[in-house]
Image (cartoon, grey):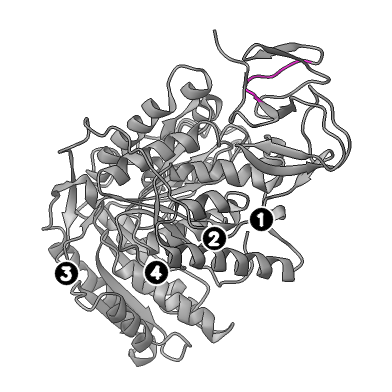
Amino acid sequence: MRRNVLKVHQDDNVLVALVDLKADEIVEYEGKEYKLKEAIPAKHKLFTDDIKVGGSVIMYGTLVGKTQCEVMTGQRMSTENVKHAASPYHYRPFNYQWDAPDVSKFVGRTIDGYHRSDGRVGTANYWLFIPTVFCENRNLDVIKEALYSELGYDVTDKYKTKVRLLKELYLDGKNVESANLSITEAIVPVDRLFKNVDGIKFLNHQGGCGGIRQDSEVLSKLLAAYADHPNVAGVTLLSLGCQNLQVKDFLRDLKERNPAFDKPLHIFEQQQSTSEEQLITDAIHQTFLSLVAANQLTRQPAPLSHLTIGVKCGGSDGFSGISANPAVGHCSDLLVALGGRVLLAEFPELCGAEQDIIDRTEDEFAARRFIELMSAYSRAAENAGSGYHMNPSPGNIRDGLITDAIKSNGAAKKAGLSPVVDVLDYTEPSLKSGLNLVCTPGNDVEATTGQAASGANLILFTTGLGTPTGNPICPVIKVASNTKLAERMKDIIDIDCGPIIAGEKTIEEMGEDILEYCIKVASGLVVPHAVRLNQDDFIPWKRGVSL
């Protein structure tokens, strides 16, 4: 029989509704009955005790809010009766013990990846175009249109066909309003010329000049990190010439990040060129020659320890923290036990989970660095008149994430239970096997942009509401918290964790399924929807307040 409610932790004083519950309905959990004071929509929480004003609301075994009025057993938690609250945190010596999961079915398994000269392995083979300044975005757009349409990377043909149909109807004087755009002429796809070049990617951005110099300095490190990424075969860089982010600064940061960098790097500066046409022609010509060379590289076997997976959630709902995130967390633990790396980012969505993370951090210096970064981030938000408590979006709240501490404790489940081996600031590379923390905003694209910079060669992105977010160089795999979403957005979602809610699969079984899917993606056997759609989202973080 399917459960209709769930208590996440034995110390909780709330239950999660797994299905829509009616007013006056009696629900039972572990031998105790609760009569509902009102209807409780699926994903929302109901109180299991009467709580006075200012009382603690406990979920995931920790403080997630304080009551703003007296609440009663069977009443629904809402923004009217509960406000965000989180326990203070500090460093303390803690002998954390972790029981690694059984990885026997994955021992000896491999991925087929692209081996780089420095020993790293890419899960894809991309050519990368980088502008040092926003002034070059238009030139990149021109190059992109030319290369995509002729080399077989354009995914917009079906939409061009629809526009062509509308145009023809209009020119023929026919009814455009009633045009059937679901039926279009057959499209003959352009074969990809370079079979072993998975894509040509463009990092258009709005930085490199203006603003403050620190923004350009951080952007330079970010672009250097992308150039050095194991999923990148080579780089074409376009510069104007007079901008804050000079080519020499980019080269310095690239050399500092990887002194042995030896990928093809073509640099073109517009103010040194005879014309725009010459600049674009030269860039296309030199890049084409390097694409011929990059196409010679083929996938070869590599141990699973070469995987670095970023874990991220966005468009979260009340099921995210009990299905998709814990399942990804088990996948994370499996990968760590196999010698791989996991990157947990979005620091605003760790509010309320800090003490658990601190206690799991192996090194005192790293633990104190986490405290410093979290505290500085929180102060910056408060000084701007905001705070972590303002992180949940209207969509989050509507689907059961009433406080940031509820959202954050559920979000932290993506990290599994393994010890934290390192804490990284924005753009710093992950160098240690195991669970790494990466300081980024909670903002979906700013976070995934930062995870790729720290070395993620795959990203597992959980969602309860649905989001198309992707990344130019790091394949993003969408994991739905519920089956309704997976069925409604089939062109976005890759994995459905709804069977956990339905009681058809355990978190552990789902975690193993997710790792199997990652192996297929890393080997080029499966293409995630975000990659198929060329969902190449890239937003550099300017280190301002971004939740």
Magenta stretch bounds: 16-22
478 left or right, relative to 189:
right
Q: According to the image, label 4 marks what residue? A: 428
Q: In the rendered view of the protein, which quadrant contains the N terminus? A: top right
Q: Are marks 1 and 4 in contact (CB under 8 Å)?
A: no
Three-letter code, disc 1 = Pro
Badge 4 local density, few (<14 within 10 Å), some, or many (20+)? some
Badge 3 local density, few (<14 within 10 Å), some, or many (20+)? few
Badge 2 local density, few (<14 within 10 Å), some, or many (20+)? some
Which is more N-terminal, label 2 or label 4? 2
Q: According to the image, label 1 marks what residue? A: 88
SS of the residue at dot 1? loop
Q: Which mark is in front, 3 or 1?
A: 1
Find residue 262 and report its image quarter. Answer: bottom left
SS of the residue at dot 4? loop
Disc 3/disc 1 C-alpha distance (Å):
57 Å
Which is more N-terminal, label 4 or label 1? 1
Three-letter code, disc 4 = Glu
Disc 4/disc 2 C-alpha distance (Å):
23 Å
Three-letter code, disc 2 = Tyr
Which is more N-terminal, label 3 or label 2? 2
Q: Is residue 481 above or below residue 332?
A: above
Three-letter code, disc 3 = Leu
Disc 1/disc 4 C-alpha distance (Å):
27 Å
Q: Position of residue 64 (x, y in %)?
A: 69, 43
Q: Which mark is in front, 2 or 3?
A: 2
